[in-house]
Amino acid sequence: MAAIVPAVEHFLLHEAVQAGVVKKVTITNPTNPNKVHKHMAPWFTEECRASRQGYKAAARKHGRSSQEAASAFSQYRATCKAAASHFAAQLPDMLKYKPREFWKWVNYVPTTAAAIPPETFASHCKGLYSRGNG
């Protein structure tokens, strides 16, 4: 019985996605640790990522409380601060030349996983399990 449950669950989810009742959601690990209103920070660049990797490497090699790790962390913060100020300076031009991208960042509304109304899911499942015309 326990082996059947994952197969049935997979089948139900696959059928619900094909019927359009739910959207398929793929979960990925974010590569950007800096969050702005629970979404990726638009200013986090490759320089920031490389600087963060340098800090983590220094912390692993010398310890977190070492002078090398402290200087790497201050470099990381300075890089991120410069990238954020550069992005903020670009916002007025973005409003003028790329308004869709500007308003995407300004009016960000976090999305949740697909919430299925119980009635819709029940009617979908009823159609799957009915035999004949009934």
Image (spheres, helix red, strand yellow):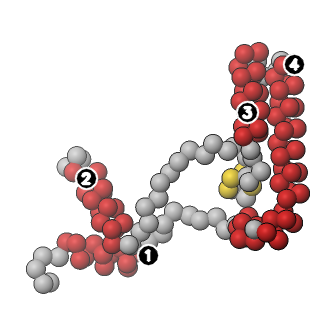
Q: Secondary structure at mark 2?
A: helix
Give whichever of discs 1 and 2 has the lower sequence position.
2
Three-letter amino acid code at the position of disc 1:
Pro
Going from N to C along the chain, the mark reached first, 2 or 4, is 2
Determine whether, in the image, residue 45 is placed left or right of residue 81. Answer: left
Q: Amino acid under label 2?
A: Ala
**What secondary structure is found at the residue carrying circle 3?**
helix
Q: Earlier in the sequence, mark 1 or mark 3?
A: 3
Q: Looking at the image, is mark 1 or mark 4 nearer the viewer?
A: 4
Q: Quadrant of the C terminus?
A: bottom left
Foreground of the two, 33 or 81: 81
Q: Which residue is mark 3?
A: 50
Picture residue at 17% right of the left edge, 76% below the top: 130
Mark 1–mark 2 distance (CA, rounded to whole Å) = 23 Å
Residue 128 on image: x %, y %: 22, 72
Q: Do labels 2 and 4 touch, CB within 8 Å?
A: no
The alpha-carbon separation of the residues under discs 3 and 4 comes to: 19 Å
* Crowd class of label 4 (few under 14; some 14 to 19; many from 20; radius 10 Å): few
Callout 2: 10 Å neighbours few (<14), some, many (20+)?
Answer: few
- Rendered position, 77 above or below 88: above
Q: Is residue 106 visible?
A: no
Residue 76 x %, y %: 82, 34
Name the side, left or right, on which 4 lies relative to 51.
Answer: left
The disc, 1 or 4, on the residue closer to the chain's N-terminal end is 4
Residue tagged 4 = 67
Instruction: Give the residue number, with chain letter if any, for mark 1.
Output: 117
